[in-house]
Image (cartoon, helix red, strand yellow):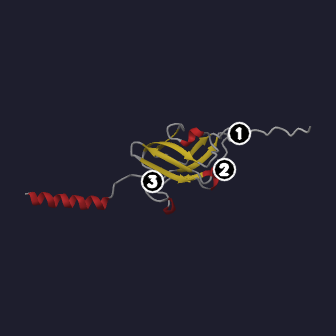
Amino acid sequence: MKRDYLVALAACAVFTSFCGCGRELHPVGGTLVWEDGQPATELVGATIYFESTEHRTVSRSAVQEGAHFQLTTDRPEASGPDGVPPGVHRVYIVDGVPSLMKPKFRRPDTSGLEVTVPFTGPVELKIERASASRGAKPDAPPDVEH
């Protein structure tokens, strides 16, 4: 009896390994745009993240030319995007220093960006530029001749 149980358990383990984890992934791509609707082409090379607390995953994509992105979860980006698990995802973006975006967009808990997957069509995420005064150096005092 015990041997039959072990054989059945081993068969289940082998069958499960052939089936994989069974994770369902959906293709998600889109564009980052500034608040005025223009593509955020200055963010090429930044990384966009979709965080799912339900699935405990973080999907990612480098921002490409034209401010476009295609997300991957399990596969390396060089192998092409494999998609995103279904459900609600908090979105955040990490760009260079100094950041061209308002700081709130660099964290999932402050960005205010959420996407529910599956999503029909491309995703358009609107972000705000950093203040022009951020990182600007104060003007030097004028030279005064005596």
On screen, residue 34 above or below 72: above
Q: Amino acid at mark 1?
A: Ala
Q: What residue is at 50 percent from the left and 60 percent from the top?
A: 80
Q: Amino acid at mark 2?
A: Glu
Q: Amino acid at mark 3?
A: Thr
Q: Which of pointers 3 and 1 lies earlier in the amino acid sequence?
A: 3
Give coordinates of residue 71: x percent, y percent. Answer: 50, 53
Which residue has dot 3 on it?
73
Q: Quadrant of residue 130?
A: top right
Q: Quadrant of the N terminus?
A: bottom left
Give coordinates of residue 20: x percent, y percent. Answer: 33, 58
Give coordinates of residue 51: x percent, y percent. Answer: 46, 45
Q: Is residue 5 visible?
A: yes
Q: Are marks 3 and 1 in contact (CB under 8 Å)?
A: no
Q: Which of pointers 1 and 2 lies earlier in the amino acid sequence?
A: 2
Q: How many marks?
A: 3
Q: Secondary structure at mark 1?
A: loop
On screen, residue 114 above or below 23: above
**In this rendering, the label closer to the viewer, 3 or 1:** 1
Which residue has dot 2 on it?
42
Q: What residue is at 66 percent from the left and 42 percent from the top?
A: 37
Which residue has dot 1 on it?
132
Q: Nearer the viewer, residue 140 or 63?
A: 140
